Amino acid sequence: MSDRDAVRRAYDEMAETYAAERSQGGRGVEILAGFLDTLPERPRVLDAGCGQGTPVLRRLADAGDPVGLDFSGEQLRLASENVPDAPLVRGDMTKLPFRDDAFDAATGFHSLIHVPLDDHATVVEEFARVLRPGGRVLLTEGVEEWSGENPDWLDSGVEMRWDIAGAEATKDQLDRAGFAVEDEWLVVDELADDEVQKPFIEARLED
Ligand SMILES: C[S@@+](CC[C@H](N)C(=O)[O-])C[C@H]1O[C@@H](n2cnc3c(N)ncnc32)[C@H](O)[C@@H]1O
């Protein structure tokens, strides 16, 4: 099984566990609120790797007209219950099924870190393609490059895999795809056992 299929299958198996553990507030939601303030009224936002839809897609749907995309059918099933007013699309972040310039912004909370490393640049290029000129992106990554598995993530009995490129590599990819990085925050990861910080990176597509 490819790493991509392993991640998709793992989220299908442990969607309920992840949803139960996922914080509904905290610093990440504050950063999202600030991001939304910079967007036009009722923005069209792509939530890439939307998962169960809470809290991110829910907030986006309260503020505008988002689309949630994920490759896990089970995650999308939960999202359809949690955010029934948002359109949901089953697809892969490396090949977004949307036309060019379709969105004002894109979010990728805790999703790029599951994409195989060789495909990270493609995801960032796909964001650049589907955003209008001047569009914005808000992504989470890891501080340093790391790839590996946890055989029993969140005591679910399910093995999960991550491919973290690191903040510097991600900012280089954004730069090469035509984005200017405008802000960065370090936020404590509430799902990690140790005190791990995760960078949130905001960037703007050059006009
Ligand atoms: C940690 S969950 C994050 C869910 C939600 N964004 C949140 O903030 O809680 C990661 C999500 O990314 C999705 N995902 C991972 N790789 C993907 C890919 N290549 N294409 C689409 N979805 C992907 C998974 O199915 C999962 O729902």
Image (spheres, helix red, strand yellow):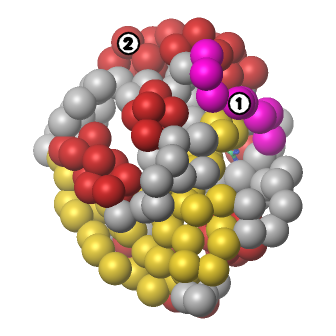
Q: Is residue 33 magenta?
A: no
State the image quarter where residue 38 is shown.
bottom left
Which image quarter is the N terminus in? top right
Magenta: main secondary structure equals loop
- Is residue 35 visible in the rendered structure shown here? yes
Q: Amino acid at mark 2?
A: Ala
Q: Which badge, 1 or 2, is on the more N-terminal residue?
A: 2
From the top left corner, tell me how far across and down residue 206 is, in percent: 55, 88
- Look at 44% across and 17% down and name the residue there: 19
From the top left corner, tell me how far across and down residue 53 is, in percent: 52, 27
Give the quarter the ligand 1 occupies.
Answer: top right
Which residue has dot 1 on it? 87
Q: Is residue 130 above or below residue 153?
A: below
- Look at 77% across and 46% down and name the residue there: 92
Q: Is residue 148 above or below residue 117?
A: above
Between 115 and 49, the one lying in front of the other is: 49
State the image quarter where residue 191 is shown.
top left
- Look at 60% across and 51% down and name the residue there: 44
Give the side of residue 36 with respect to residue 184, left or right.
Answer: right
Region in magenta: 84-91
Between 71 and 100, the one lying in front of the other is: 100
Which residue has dot 2 on it? 20
